[in-house]
DNA sequence: TAAACTGGTTTCATTATTTGAAACTTAGTT
DNA sequence: AACTAAGTTTCAAATAATGAAACCAGTTTA
C-alpha cells in the first residue's frame, strides 16, 4: 500500500532500510526476527545486497551493516539532488548575518531531511548532521514545506505523521496542524513554537520554484533564552532574500552543459 | 563476473549508479543512450527507483537525479559501517598534534572512499569531502590498504586500477605497484610521493583488526613546500598510536547493547 | 559420546515477475 | 496535415524469485 511494494527491488530496499534502522551491525538472525520474509528469501536478499556492496559483512563477527557504496551514492545525491551545494554560499552569508543556526531541509516522503546546517558559533562537522531525519509536523521547516504542498500530496503526508506530543505546544491532530498550515501559507512563513523541544524556537520559510513547487525550506533557530518569536519574525525579510536567491540558483543551475548533439 | 549481475536488484542498482555518474539531473533519453537495456526495461527500472525515492524526478524539467532517500541511508551507513564516528575524537587529536590535514579512508571495491577529513588550519565542511572517491593505486591510503589485503582479494583490485600517469612518480604498472606494496607491508607504512598531484605528499598507515583484516587507513598530508618524506616519516609513531587506538575502538564497539532475549 | 539445538546455507519444483518488441500517445516540427 | 522525437503502455514468452524442507557446521545439554 503506502510507499513500498515495487517488485523485488522494493523488497530488497526494504531490507536495506531494515539494516539501516538498527544503528549497529546486525546478525542475520536478528534481521530474520523482524523480517516478514522466510529464512531463505531474506538470506538471498542479504547476499545480493552484500555482493552489491550496499551492505558490508564483517566476517569476524558475522554481522551486516550498511555498506560504503551508499556513502558514495549519497555523495552524488547530495551534490546533485539536494539544494545544499548550490545554497552553500547563501547559507554561509545568512548564518553570519543573523548569528544563529541555519538549517536547510528537504522533504522525503513524510519526513524532513536536513541536508545542510550552519552554526554561526561552532560549526558542527557536517555529515553528522546532514542526512539526519526529523518529524515534519513539529518542526519549522517541516510545516513550511507542507504548507505549500499541493492538496493531493499533502493528504498522505498528514496521515503519516505520528503526532506524538513532545511538548504542550505540539500539534496532536491533523486538524490543528492543517489550520496552522493555512496560516503559514497566507503569511509566507511559519514558526516552531517549542513544539519539538522546550526552549527551542525557529522561523522557517519555504524555498519554492517559479512554478510554486516546494524545493525545500530554510530555518533560523534560536532559544527562548536569547530571543522570542517577534525577534525571529524580524528576520523574515532577510531570510526571504536568501530563500529567493537559492530558488534562483536552483532554476539557473540544472543543465550546466546541455549537449547540443544531433 | 566482477561485481555486477545479481538478478533484478543488481540491475536496478546499476541504473542507480549510472544516474549518479552523471553529475547532474538527466533525461530518460540520455540514460537510454548509455544503457544496455531496452527502452521499456530501463523505463520500468527508473519508475521503480523513483517510487522508492532512490531517484527523484523533476516534473518541470523531466529529469532524474539521485534521491534524498540515499542521503538518509548514507547517514546510517556512515554512522554504522564507517570508522568515522568512532574515530572522530582520535582524528581531532591527531590533526591538532601534527598540524596537518588528516584523512580517514576505506576501501570500496577498487576505489578509496574518504569517510572523514580533518584540516588543522581551515576545517572544510565535511559532506563535500566525505563520500568522495579516489583512485587506490596512487594515493597513500589506497596503497596502505592494498598492502594488507589477502592475495585473493588483492588480485582483482590491482587489475581494476587505471594506472593513469598523473605525475612522473605515478605507478603505471601492476608490477611496480606490487613491489611498493611489499615494501609497505614490511615497513608498516607507505608514502604518496607526489604520485597524484605534484607538490602533495603524505604518509599513510593501515588500520587493521586484531585478525589482520583491513578496516581502513589513515594519512597525514602535506606539501613539498612545507616538509619532505623524512619529515612525514617522523610522524609515523604518532600516527600509529592513533591507528591502533581506532582499531581498538572498533573492536570494542560493535554490539553496544546486544539483547538478551530468549 | 551421543543426542538435541542453534544459526546459517543450499536445493529444487512451483509460482510470480521480469522482459522487450511493438504498438501507442503526446507534444513539438516541418 | 503529415512527420518526428520522447515518453508510456501492452502482452505472451522467458526468466528469475520463492520458500518448505533438507542440510551442515558448531555448541550446548543429557
Image: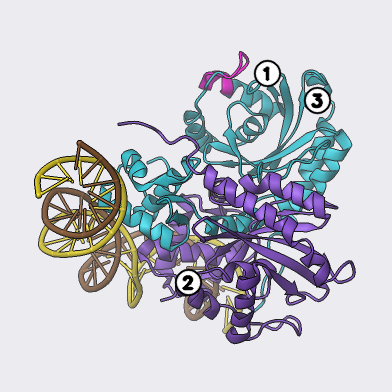
Chain colours: A purple, B cyan, C brown, D yellow
**Residue A243: x percent and y percent?**
65, 55
Q: Which residue is mark 1?
A: B198
Q: Residue furthest top?
A: B168
Chain letter belonging to callout 2: A
A157 over B48 or under it: above or below: below
Q: Relative to the observer, which residue lies in front, B208 or A139?
A: A139
From the viewer's side, name the closer residue of B52 and B210. B52
Do circles 3 and 2 both sit on a common chain? no
- For disc 3, the chain is B
**Dot 3 corresponds to which residue?**
B232
Q: Residues within 10 Å of mark 2 (few under 14, many from 20)?
A: few
Q: Position of residue B110 (x, y in %)?
A: 53, 36
Seen in the picture, residue D3 relative to A192 is either above or below; the reply is above
The residue depicted at 54 percent of the width and 49 percent of the height is A77
Q: Residue D23 in the image: state x and y as whole percent.
A: 37, 65
Report whether B126 appears left or right of B240.
left
Q: Which mark is residue B137?
A: none
Which comes before the other along the chain, label 1 or label 3? 1
Looking at the rendering, the stretch of residues picked out in magenta corresponds to: B166-177
Q: Is residue A25 left or right of residue B84?
A: left
Query: Residue A153: which numbered mark, if any?
Result: 2
Quadrant where the N terminus of chain B is found in the figure:
top left
Mark 1 or mark 2: which is in front? 2
Q: Nearer the observer, disc 1 or disc 3?
A: 1
Q: Is residue A60 above or below residue A204?
A: above
Amino acid at each position: 500500500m503506502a510507499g513500498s511494494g515495487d517488485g523485488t527491488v522494493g523488497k530488497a530496499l526494504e531490507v536495506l532500510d531494515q539494516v539501516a534502522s538498527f544503528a549497529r551491525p546486525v546478525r542475520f538472525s536478528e534481521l530474520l526476527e523482524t523480517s516478514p520474509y522466510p529464512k531463505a528469501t531474506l538470506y538471498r536478499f542479504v547476499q545480493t545486497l552484500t555482493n552489491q556492496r550496499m551492505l558490508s559483512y564483517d566476517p569476524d563477527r558475522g554481522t551486516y551493516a550498511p555498506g560504503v557504496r551508499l556513502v558514495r551514492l549519497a555523495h552524488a545525491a547530495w551534490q546533485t539532488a539536494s539544494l545544499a551545494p548550490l545554497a552553500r554560499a547563501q547559507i554561509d552569508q545568512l548564518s553570519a548575518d543573523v548569528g544563529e543556526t541555519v538549517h536547510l531541509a528537504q522533504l522525503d516522503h513524510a519526513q524532513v531531511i536536513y541536508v545542510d546546517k550552519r552554526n554561526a558559533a561552532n560549526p558542527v562537522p557536517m555529515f553528522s548532521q546532514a542526512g539526519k531525519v526529523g518529524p515534519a509536523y513539529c518542526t519549522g521547516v517541516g510545516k513550511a514545506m507542507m504548507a505549500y504542498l499541493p492538496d493531493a500530496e499533502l493528504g498522505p503526508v498528514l496521515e503519516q505523521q505520528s503526532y506524538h506530543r513532545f511538548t504542550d505546544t505540539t500539534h496532536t491532530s491533523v486538524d490543528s496542524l492543517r489550520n496552522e498550515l493555512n496560516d503559514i501559507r497566507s503569511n509566507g512563513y511559519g514558526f516552531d513554537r517549542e513544539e519539538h523541544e522546550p526552549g527551542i524556537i525557529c522561523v522557517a520559510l519555504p524555498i519554492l520554484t517559479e512554478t510554486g513547487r516546494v524545493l525545500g525550506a530554510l530555518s533560523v533557530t534560536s532559544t527562548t533564552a536569547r530571543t522570542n518569536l517577534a525577534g525571529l519574525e524580524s528576520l523574515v525579510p532577510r531570510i526571504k532574500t536568501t530563500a529567493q536567491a537559492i530558488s534562483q540558483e536552483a532554476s539557473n543551475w540544472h543543465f550546466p552543459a546541455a549537449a547540443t548533439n544531433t
